[in-house]
Image: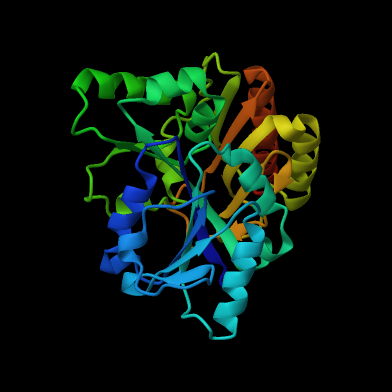
């Protein structure tokens, strides 16, 4: 069964998340989308509602669904799946979860990945953060949630660039690069955001990791990142041992792991996500993005030394190199 991709849309107060969603929901290529609003209070989607009532699920123009969730996300997703399977609702192909502006995305991701229903029916497509270039510097200095939203994102959408100076935009881009050197940064204008600009593809990962060496962030917010690209096939047992050791070692300090791996005797690349010590069910892509079949891994940690992340990546890379060496010996 094909699982439904889910994107977590985050961003600090006033960053323009709802405005962005409103624009996307009006586009034909955003049909068949369920939007879960994880927000306490009203949200600015009223002008798109075509069906009112006390139901927590509302039909939107273009065939989309809006579901309001207070607290845990898993029950809202379960309700969507139940009603879609009972044909009370039209089927949907993707889900966007819009979080509160004051939310730390790490516990939300942890709650989803720990949920059995989520692992059965959904796959994490990525985290998108809306970044207000006019206010982000102050928000990041004063609010750890703003830093976490940027640090855990796969894609950073810089909003309000039309009313910001080029200097303001540049300083925000430099700050974001320190917080999260692996995320793709996109400048978006009001009402013009498109599906390709918004929706992170898993294949963002190899484009983000352009150099085959470690990249560590000296950001003083106690958030460290490291990434590595390396060759060689990884034996399943060696991968399992590495995952057990790394997750047990880092525990909740491992905010996020993203990996595209060449697992031995598997034709397709294997994609892994982990959040705060919890591993999401692996996903096999249909094909490699290139012929090199290179492994790519990103680790994002909090209150952990960068060298510990680098050492963990080096241990995994060593297993790939050992497999390559064994194959070379066998051919002689």
Give x and y (percent) for residue 22: 32, 56
Please tell me which residue is depicted at 60% across the width and 65% down the height of the picture.
77
Please tell me which residue is depicted at 60% across the width and 18% down the height of the picture.
222
* Residue 165 occupies quadrant: top left
Vertical arrangement, residue 221 with respect to residue 74, above or below: above
On the picture, is 281 further left or further right than 262?
Answer: right
Give x and y (percent) for residue 308: 69, 22
Give x and y (percent) for residue 19: 32, 49
Is residue 150 in sight in this rendering?
yes
Front one among 280 and 263: 280
Where the C terminus falls, by quadrant? Answer: top right
Vertical arrangement, residue 261 with respect to residue 162, above or below: below
Vertical arrangement, residue 324 with respect to residue 137, above or below: below
Is residue 328 in sight in this rendering?
no
Front one among 2 and 261: 2
On the picture, is 332 further left or further right than 260?
Answer: right
Where the N terminus falls, by quadrant? Answer: bottom right
Front one among 64 and 241: 64
């Amino acid at each position: 069964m094909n699982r439904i991709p889910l994107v977590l849309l985050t961003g600090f107060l006033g960053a323009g998340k709802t405005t962005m969603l409103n624009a996307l929901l009006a586009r034909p290529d955003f049909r068949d989308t369920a939007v879960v609003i994880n927000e306490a209070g009203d949200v600015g989607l009223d002008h798109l509602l075509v069906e009112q009532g006390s139901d927590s699920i509302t039909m939107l123009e273009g065939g989309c669904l809006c579901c309001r969730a207070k607290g845990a996300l898993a029950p809202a997703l379960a309700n969507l799946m139940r009603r879609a399977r009972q044909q009370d609702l039209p089927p949907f192909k993707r889900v966007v979860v819009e979080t509160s502006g004051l939310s730390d995305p790490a516990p939300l991701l942890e709650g989803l990945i720990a949920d059995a229903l989520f692992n059965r029916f959904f796959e994490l497509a990525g985290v998108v953060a809306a970044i207000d270039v006019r206010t982000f510097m102050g928000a990041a200095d004063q609010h750890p949630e703003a830093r976490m939203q940027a640090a855990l994102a796969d894609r950073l959408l810089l909003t309000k660039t039309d009313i910001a100076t080029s200097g303001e935009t540049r300083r925000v881009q430099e700050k974001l690069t320190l917080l999260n050197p692996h995320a793709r940064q996109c400048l978006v204008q009001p009402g013009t955001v498109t599906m390709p600009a918004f929706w992170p593809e898993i294949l963002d990962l190899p484009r983000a990791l352009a150099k085959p060496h470690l990249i560590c962030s000296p950001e003083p917010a106690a958030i460290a990142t490291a990434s590595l690209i390396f060759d060689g096939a990884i034996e399943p047992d060696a991968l399992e041992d590495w995952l057990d050791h790394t997750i047990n070692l880092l525990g909740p300090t491992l905010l996020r792991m993203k990996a595209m791996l060449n697992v031995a005797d598997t034709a397709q690349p294997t994609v892994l996500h982990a959040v705060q010590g919890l591993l999401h069910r692996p996903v096999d892509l249909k094909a490699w993005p290139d012929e090199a079949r290179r492994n790519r891994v990103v680790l994002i940690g909090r209150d952990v030394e960068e060298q510990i992340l680098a050492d963990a990546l080096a241990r995994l890379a060593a297993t790939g190199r050992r497999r390559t060496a064994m194959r070379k010996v066998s051919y002689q």
